[in-house]
């Protein structure tokens, strides 16, 4: 092994295995049927959620949002506590929406700590309030409620999980019948 090369844990093979799984099929179906989709995570996954939400909104006919603003996050944490800020954000952002047409997707590298528990609390709230809910995680996370879709990447490194998570947001777009842009086509280079 080259010690100067980043370990990506056979990322393409892992990606292929994930999108062939029954859990992924459930998530893709929920995504396809959703009108409103909520992406969220912590740390690098908050950036993945924000990036994925922006691209998904502009490339599909869905309303997809993430709590990307530090102002949003810190205000909600100040109003409640760290463990419930995402649940509070989700509750606020879904007001007035038909929750049966909503999907909440949490991205997590962590297992059984405050960061992960915060995401699980939000997903449990979504599930109890008639939303579809899914966790995309680096390792298996029990996620509380049994109806929550659990997509497990089975990776060791944070960077591999975060890259896979972004790849999977594009797969959701593609799997829903929408096109992901081509750099060469946009620049009209042949």
Image (cartoon, grey):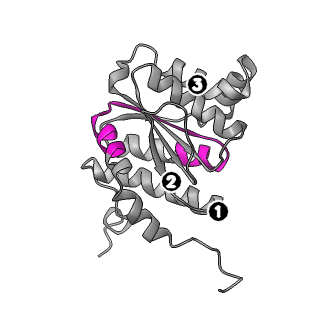
Which mark is first along the chain, 2 or 1? 1
Write down the region rendered in magenta: 26-49
Position of residue 140 measured from the top left corner of the image (x, y, whole percent):
55, 50
Q: Is residue 190 left or right of residue 6?
A: left
Task: Give the alpha-carbon distance from disc 1 to disc 2, as whole Å.
Answer: 12 Å
122 vs 174, nearest the viewer: 122
Secondary structure of the residue carrying numbered label 1: loop
The residue located at (58%, 53%) in the rendering is 139
Task: Name the residue tied to disc 2.
Answer: 165
Q: Is residue 85 magenta?
A: no
The residue located at (43%, 63%) in the rendering is 15
Where 5 falls versus 157 (above or below)?
Answer: below
Task: Name the residue tied to disc 3.
Answer: 87
Q: On residue 157, which mark appears?
A: 1
Secondary structure of the residue carrying numbered label 3: helix
Secondary structure of the residue carrying numbered label 2: helix
Where 58 falls versus 185 (above or below)?
Answer: above
- Callout 2: 10 Å neighbours few (<14), some, many (20+)? many
Which mark is first along the chain, 3 or 2? 3
Residue furthest to the left in view is: 177
């Amino acid at each position: 092994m080259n010690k100067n090369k980043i370990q990506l844990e056979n990322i393409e093979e892992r990606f292929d295995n994930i999108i062939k799984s029954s859990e992924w099929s459930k998530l893709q179906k929920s995504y396809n049927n959703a009108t409103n989709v909520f992406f969220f995570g912590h740390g690098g996954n908050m950036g993945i959620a924000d990036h994925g939400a922006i691209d998904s909104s502009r490339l599909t006919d869905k309303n997809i949002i993430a709590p990307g603003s530090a102002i949003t996050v810190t205000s909600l944490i100040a109003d409640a506590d760290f463990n419930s800020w995402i649940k509070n954000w989700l509750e606020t952002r879904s007001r007035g929406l038909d929750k049966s047409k909503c999907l909440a997707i949490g991205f997590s590298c962590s297992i059984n700590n405050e960061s992960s528990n915060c995401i699980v609390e939000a997903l449990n709230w979504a599930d109890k309030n008639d939303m579809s809910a899914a966790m995309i995680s680096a390792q298996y996370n029990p996620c509380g409620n049994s109806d929550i879709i659990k997509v497990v990447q089975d990776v060791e490194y944070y960077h591999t999980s975060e890259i896979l998570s972004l790849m999977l947001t594009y797969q959701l777009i593609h799997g829903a019948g929408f096109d992901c842009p081509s750099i060469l086509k946009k620049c009209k280079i042949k």
